[in-house]
Amino acid sequence: MIRLAINKDLKTAVPDLALGCISADVLVEKRNEALWREIDRHLAHLSSTIKPEQINSVPQIAAMRGAYKALGKDPSRYRGSAEALLRRVLSGKGLYRINSVVDINNLVSLESLNPAGTYDLEKITPPVELRIGAAGESYKGIGKDLINIESLPVLADAAGPFGSPTSDSERAMVSMETQKVLMVVFSFTGPEGLERWVSRASELLRRHCGGEGIETSLVP
């Protein structure tokens, strides 16, 4: 399992921050209809149980917004990915179909209501640390322009930052050629319950992406 740590300055500012990590060998597919049946069922469940005006009071989302405020980042401008996905679903826009691995990432995020990111392990140079984005730091977001990651929690390897709970960089993005992945579930409410989502992600990768050599860890 790739070594991943939370920087002490970030942990001091956001003491309840914890990570669930999964690495796996995978086969990426453009479309997986069995997976999308699971996704559609969960989207229907979300639409029937959460109203748009309740989003900010969801415990996981409220905790993430509080963490961003503690770091000096506006959580309404830089939304966590779980909040952004949930707002999209509840507005009736549904989800983009990207590929089987990214679609699993989004399902785990919407089931746990925690941000999640999945990265091509062969594009990452360990060790990996979750730290606070430095002044002036930015990267090219997936399908976006440069993202200002200053004061955001950011995943960084030996080559620099490549991911965050808000939006990930193009550098480590999952493509159809990806064979090894690292999935990270970001919890702002502590490690309790993370084991469930690590197991769920592992199961989905095994069942829908031929996941093998799966390794997991929690970073409290």
Image (cartoon, rainbow, N blue to C red):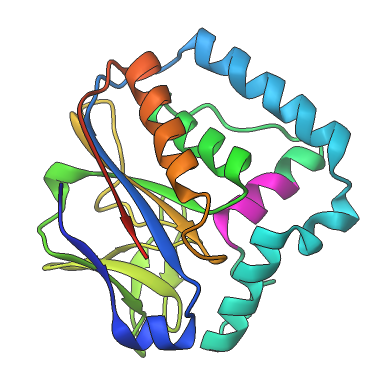
Nearest to the observer: residue 210 or residue 215: 215
Residue 162 place in picture, x, y as percent: 29, 61
Residue 118 place in picture, x, y as percent: 35, 44
Q: Is residue 158 magenta?
A: no
Nearest to the observer: residue 77 or residue 101: 101
Residue 186 place in picture, x, y as percent: 46, 58
Residue 220 place in picture, x, y as percent: 37, 65
Question: Is residue 143 visible to the viewer in this orientation of the structure?
Answer: no
Q: Is residue 6 above or below residue 115?
A: below
Q: Residue at x 18, y 28 (%)?
A: 179
Q: Residue at x 78, y 25 (%)?
A: 44
Residue found at the very far front of the displayed protein: 192
Q: Residue at x 12, y 43 (%)?
A: 122
Q: Is residue 86 magenta?
A: yes
Question: Is residue 68 visible to the viewer in this orientation of the structure?
Answer: yes
Q: What residue span does the magenta drawing correspond to?
A: 80-87
Residue 107, located in which quarter of the rendered image?
top right
Q: Residue at x 61, y 41 (%)?
A: 110
Count of picture labels: 0
Q: Is residue 63 left or right of residue 116?
A: right
Q: Main secondary structure of the magenta part?
A: helix
Residue found at the very far top of the displayed protein: 34
